[in-house]
Image (tube, coloured by chain):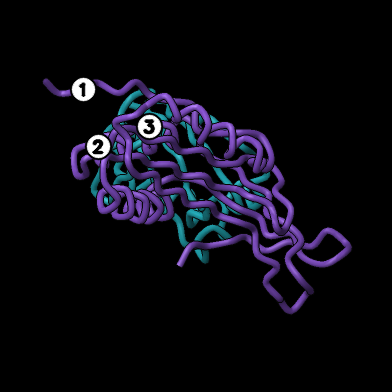
Amino acid sequence: MEITINILYFGMLAEITGLANETWLVKDGLTVGDLKQEIGDKYPLIREKKFKVAVNQQIGDDGTKISFQSEVALLPPFAGG
Amino acid sequence: MEKIHKPKKVFVQGPISPQFVADSIARHQSKVNIGAHAIFLGQIRADEKEEGFVTGIEYSAYEEMAEQAFHAIREDAFSKFDLTCMHIYHSLGLVPTGEISLFVFVSSAHRRAAFEASEYIVDEIKTKVPIFGKEMVGPVGEYIWKENK
């Protein structure tokens, strides 16, 4: 089964993709680690960047599962303060 | 009973003015259980880069997650330190060199809690809040993405 997810890009990552967000069709049960692979295939320049992935506004790790209508955000290094 | 703190608006567009800071202090003069305020102000530094001097930082954020992260930091600080009140403001958009981009204002009955809480809150903001910054460099619009150490 395939599900749609919404991916948000921030900072330098949005510059690489040329997009602030996009909707992807992915396999149900996809993990953050799997998604990073797919994103790296579509946008090879992202592989060289340091970033964290938030799923529904919580920082995840490679094992975090992504489910139907999840909001997934790619976050470059933080610079607040 | 545990006090419930409502999420507060943190982001302001552009620099935080010294007048805003002064007005915030003035608003606390009626709260006479306070004996100590600690204020931290983050100011944009003119770092020298290969391309020239930094002229300002343009901030952006994953705003919904950032507001939640600020709220969690506030709750955490209230539970760790004996505080009367706490205010956090952070800029979005362009903040020129020499201007203020972060204003953390904590108040307590005594100084120790205020000192310790302000340091804790600033450290947490730097590592946990998804805010991104473009350091504008030199005269022709070049920039470098900033990364907190």
Whether residue A41 is visible, yes or no, is no
Position of residue A81 measured from the top left corner of the image (x, y, whole percent): 51, 53
| Residue nearest the viewer, comparing A4 with A48 | A48
Asked if badges 1 and 3 are on one and the same chain, I answer: yes
Classify residue B82 as left or right of residue B63: left
Checking the image for residue B78, the label placed there is 2
Classify residue B31 as left or right of residue A51: left
> Chain letter of disc 3?
B
Q: What residue type is labelled 3?
A: Gln
Is residue B4 placed above or below A43 in the rendered structure? above
Is residue B86 placed above or below B7 in the rendered structure? below
Residue at left 71%, top 76%?
Answer: B48
Checking the image for residue B68, the label placed there is 3
SS for tag 2?
Answer: helix
Q: Earlier in the sequence, mark 1 or mark 2?
A: 1
Q: Which amino acid does label 1 sit on?
A: Lys
